[in-house]
């Protein structure tokens, strides 16, 4: 009887506590007048589970469009990752966020990201990102990247010789990851030995899948595995950095050969050089930034070209004209890339329908009003590529694959945002363009292909990927 009574008291106290938390939770949001319409979900959890679940079911846009239909086509409120969030839903919202960077809003990541990517300087991921953006333009602008096109083509040729040629069937996504990661290792760290690249590849896959997972740090969880993978990668990076310092001192490495050398030899405005730990932090961020996004893009290029033979034939025609203009063994160059207009329109349409970057968060640094609604300081904001990419107001017949959308002046401003926009537009946009086009050139001049799983499910975690990795049957061109 006493045990029964004690259990009843504990249960009552638990229910009472939850009630108080629930009331305080909703009262804290009700204290601000004229908030956007929407729902905040459960205390602490909010609507995080539904947000993540729709992505893993292959329809991340459903979370957005269901609430747009119910609450507002401009902005609605929700709660994700334990934070109140205003979700911007149209071009006006995108323009507002991109135009008010560091005025009304600033970049924000869930606290889980800082745990996976802890800075050696005890600064936030946001501050580290700002420092990196000051450093990248010299390497990522088109005129600087021109000299890397031949290197990209060399890596691509080696990749296809090792992973595709002589095979009847391949699984595209793992191979695409190998390609994009090999390129990043070569251009950022001057590492091109496939065995050394492979040493990084597996922990990076674990890391990428855990970035936006539920932040539960228990053994076996994706979040816990991501933290461990981050430590493994940083340890390897520090060994590479130490060796590069020796090579630079002995003139065995060039000061301008890659981003790593630049970081080691460049001081800040105070004359201070970055520590090895700090450089490892930044290189890790760069590698993860280009790890799954480009590989997801080229995987979906392969997917759509398999499904749309008329599009494939036009891409093949353009790329073979370029291939036939080259001498045996001659590498691609900048002029060749400029001739790939149709291929790039195809890639853009692929990224409209399957954006590698689904969206990004901001934080309100001041109270402001948008579309007649109050957004309190400290609230988080989220822009979603899918909210405009699949909106018939901006893209008629949005489910139709139509590369001609990108001819002439292209889509309306702020409607096509696979790389974000404003001051925080992805600094690797031009790098990604070259990476994708070099891949397209090398794959279509070698093969046609057929999907082995016609109805393969797509999941988003956090990038869109085919659930089984997109297995295809290769059909080599007859010489």
Image (spheres, rainbow, N blue to C red):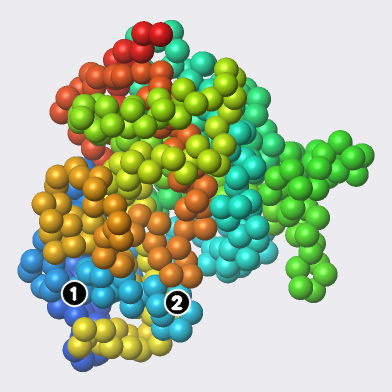
- Quadrant for the C terminus, please: top left
Badge 1 element: loop
Q: Is residue 379 above or below residue 247?
A: below
Residue 90 in sight from this viewpoint: yes
> Is residue 62 found left or right of 413 in the rendered image?
left
User: x%, y% of residue 197?
Assistant: 60, 29
Q: Is residue 377 above or below residue 270?
A: below
Quadrant in which residue 56 is drawn? top left
Viewer-closest of 278 and 83:
278
* Earlier sequence position, callout 1 versus callout 2: 1
Q: Which residue is mark 2?
A: 101
> Is residue 76 found left or right of 137 in the rendered image?
left
User: x%, y% of residue 199?
Assistant: 60, 28
User: x%, y% of residue 20?
Assistant: 22, 78
> Is residue 99 found left or right of 44 in the rendered image?
right
Viewer-closest of 117 and 296:
296
Mark 1 and mark 2 residues within 8 Å of each other at the beta carbon: no
Q: Residue at x 45, y 63 (%)?
A: 425
- Quadrant for the N terminus, please: bottom left
Label 2: few (<14), some (14–19) or many (≥20) C-alpha neighbours in 10 Å: some
Badge 2 element: loop
Residue 224 in sight from this viewpoint: no
* Disc number for residue 185: none
Q: CA distance from mark 1 to mark 2?
A: 19 Å
Quadrant in which residue 221 is drawn? top left
Q: Which residue lies most toward the right here?
A: 250
Q: Which residue is mark 1?
A: 74
Q: Residue at x 60, y 47 (%)?
A: 145
Q: Residue at x 43, y 70 (%)?
A: 422
Viewer-closest of 397 and 329:
329
């Amino acid at each position: 009887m006493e045990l029964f009574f004690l259990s009843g008291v504990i249960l009552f106290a638990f229910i009472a506590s939850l009630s108080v938390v629930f009331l305080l939770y909703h009262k804290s949001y009700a204290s601000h007048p004229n908030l956007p319409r929407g729902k905040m979900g459960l205390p602490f959890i909010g609507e995080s589970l539904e947000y993540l679940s729709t992505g893993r079911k292959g329809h991340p846009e459903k979370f957005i469009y269901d609430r747009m239909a119910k609450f507002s086509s401009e902005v609605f409120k929700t709660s994700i990752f334990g934070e109140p969030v205003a979700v911007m839903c149209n071009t006006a919202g995108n323009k507002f966020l991109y135009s008010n960077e560091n005025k009304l809003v600033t970049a924000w990541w869930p606290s889980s990201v800082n745990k996976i990517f802890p800075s050696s300087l005890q600064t936030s991921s946001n501050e580290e990102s700002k420092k990196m953006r000051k450093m990248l333009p010299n390497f990522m602008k088109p005129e600087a990247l021109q000299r890397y096109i031949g290197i990209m083509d060399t890596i691509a040729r080696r990749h296809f010789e090792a992973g595709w040629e002589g095979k009847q069937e391949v699984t595209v996504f793992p191979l695409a990851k190998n390609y994009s990661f090999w390129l990043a290792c070569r251009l950022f760290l001057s590492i091109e030995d496939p065995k050394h690249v492979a040493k990084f590849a597996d922990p990076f896959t674990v890391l990428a899948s855990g970035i936006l997972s539920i932040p539960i740090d228990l053994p076996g969880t994706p979040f816990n595995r991501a933290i461990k993978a981050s430590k493994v990668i940083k340890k390897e990076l520090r060994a590479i950095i130490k060796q590069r310092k020796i090579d630079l001192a002995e003139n065995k490495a060039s000061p301008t050969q890659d981003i790593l050398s630049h970081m080691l030899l460049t001081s800040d405005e105070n004359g201070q050089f970055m520590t090895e730990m700090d450089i490892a932090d930044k290189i890790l961020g760069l590698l993860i930034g280009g790890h799954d996004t480009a590989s997801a893009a080229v995987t979906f290029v392969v997917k759509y070209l398999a499904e749309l033979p008329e599009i494939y034939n036009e891409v093949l025609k353009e790329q073979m004209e370029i291939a036939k203009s080259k001498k045996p063994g001659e590498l691609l160059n900048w002029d060749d890339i400029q001739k790939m207009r149709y291929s790039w329109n195809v890639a853009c349409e692929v990224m409209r329908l399957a954006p590698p970057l689904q969206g990004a968060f901001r934080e309100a640094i001041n109270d402001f009003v948008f579309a007649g609604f109050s957004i309190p300081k400290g609230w988080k904001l989220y822009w979603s590529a899918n909210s405009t990419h699949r909106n018939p107001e901006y893209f008629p017949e949005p489910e139709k694959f139509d590369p001609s959308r990108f001819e002439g002046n292209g889509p309306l401003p702020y409607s096509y945002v696979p790389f974000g926009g404003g001051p925080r537009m992805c600094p690797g946009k031009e790098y990604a363009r070259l990476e994708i086009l070099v891949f397209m050139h090398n794959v279509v001049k070698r093969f046609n292909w057929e999907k082995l799983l016609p109805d393969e499910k797509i999941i988003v975690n956090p990038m869109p990927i085919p659930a089984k990795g997109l297995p295809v049957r290769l059909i080599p061109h007859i010489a």
